[in-house]
Amino acid sequence: MGIEYKIKQGDKIHFVGIGGIGMSGLAQLFAAHGCEVSGSDRGAAQSENQAIISPLLAQNIKIFPQDGSFIKSITPDCLVYSTAIEDDNPDFLAAPEIPRVHRAGALAAAVALNRKQVSIAVAGSCGKTTVTAWLAEALYNLGADPACLDGGLVNTFRAPACAGNYRNGKGRYFVFEADESDKSLLVYRPDYVLILNMGTDHYPKEELAEVFASFATGAGKGVILEREVYSLIKDRLPEKLRVIVFGPEVHSYEISDGRAKAKIGDGEIILPVPGRHNAFNAAAVLATLAELGYDCEAARAAAENFNGVRRRFDHAGHTAAGAAVYDDYAHNPEKIASCIHAAQEIAAGKVFAVFQPHGFGPFGFMRETLFEALEKTLRPEDRFIFLPPFYAGGTSSFKPSSEEVTVSYRQNGTKKYFCYPSRAELTKHLDAEAGKGDMILIMGARDNSLADYARSLAK
């Protein structure tokens, strides 16, 4: 992908696909560190993307159409791209001589720019966006003024000139999300590595265990591992590496008086968001804060004061018939099952679980595992509904289709599976079938218009 280049402070950097959640966060980080930042994006003008694009513009980050026209106005030192960008992208073709840096390499350079701060990388198949935000906000509540780079828009950090996925803190800590989807996290060398779990979003478990073990081995000060992750990778870790295991100290979880509560260690914590999985997320946050030297009671109080992340079990309102509508970024089997469990805990009636796959490739990879998870998770009265996979352009086989997978699930399963070719057709079904006490759960990644659709159902 071009000439090797190492980003330096003060560089001119152009982000190809700057509207993506990871790319936009990095763009804000480099802008905050004195770099001249620009970018292009196919969806920059779309209304559903303005929660990210408008704050970028407010930070004087130049946004161009993704047609190669940027080169007429600026000559950047490098182009930053992600795995989602095709080789024949117009920006690449317009500037073939300019060095290109993968997003992972750019994040590694960002960690180097923040070298005066203690870096904490949060990884795992599920929950890393929430836990990155939760840990950063707890440190913020404790007065630590952390920097944070997240894969979601952190509600507390959002402002007209701040999208919420990057916070330019000046304190001792830099908390960032490390994505395993393309194994790019292996280029990072953080002080602490926190690994939450191992699922089946991108790789078989044995392969993912190897990736996480290699990542953990690169930690400078220590690793914090969920107990099952530890059991799977412990034999691959060096003996001198400091390892903290969390999970066994989660003793209970319950919904009481409309609030989610968990007993973690010797104390009880009121969880800001429902779901048994969030008790383990809280345990990860508390274990990390303890490792950083914070008093357990102060840490617990700080963790309880978490305001969440956009599109993580967001309440969008109620339909005219009285059904509650929630919106969530869940997009792999483990996350979808956890989200449905949380909905079942608080819904008096049926759960209408709507899922838009975030691409044909991921959909094909997860179809069997998702089926197994849904057969275990759905109740007889619940309904699981597919929309067509999200397509953002580029090369694709356009297989499998949602219709094909739905037919397969119906033939082989015992639960209720549906598929609608459009949101308009789905809305007719939900208006006719979902009533008071029921919950409509909208799930899917990458497509920001899903949040708008969820809100449109709440009339």
Image (cartoon, rainbow, N blue to C red):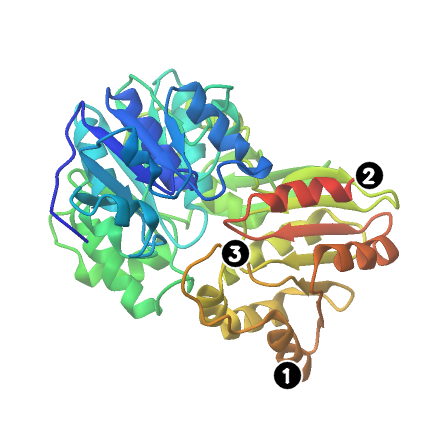
Q: Report whether residue 162 is seen.
A: no
Image quadrant in which you'd find residue 103: top left
Looking at marks 3 and 2 on the same chain, the residue that comes earlier in the sequence is marked by 3
- Which residue bears the numbered disc 3? 331
- Which residue bears the numbered disc 1? 412
Contact flag, marks 3 and 1 (Cβ < 8 Å): no
Q: Nearer the viewer, residue 207 or 73?
A: 73
In space, the residues marked 3 and 2 are separated at their CA atoms by: 26 Å
Q: Who's the residue at 25% across and 59% down the image?
A: 211
Q: Who's the residue at 47% across and 27% down the image?
A: 163
* Amino acid found under the numbered disc labelled 2: Lys
* Amino acid found under the numbered disc labelled 3: His
State which mark lies toward you, 1 or 2: 2
Q: Report whether residue 410 is seen.
A: yes
Give the secondary structure at mark 3.
loop
Q: Nearer the viewer, residue 20 or 341?
A: 20
Contact flag, marks 1 and 2 (Cβ < 8 Å): no
- Which residue bears the numbered disc 2? 459
Q: Nearer the viewer, residue 254 or 109?
A: 109
In space, the residues marked 1 and 2 are separated at their CA atoms by: 36 Å
Q: Give percent across and percent down for residue 318.
A: 79, 40
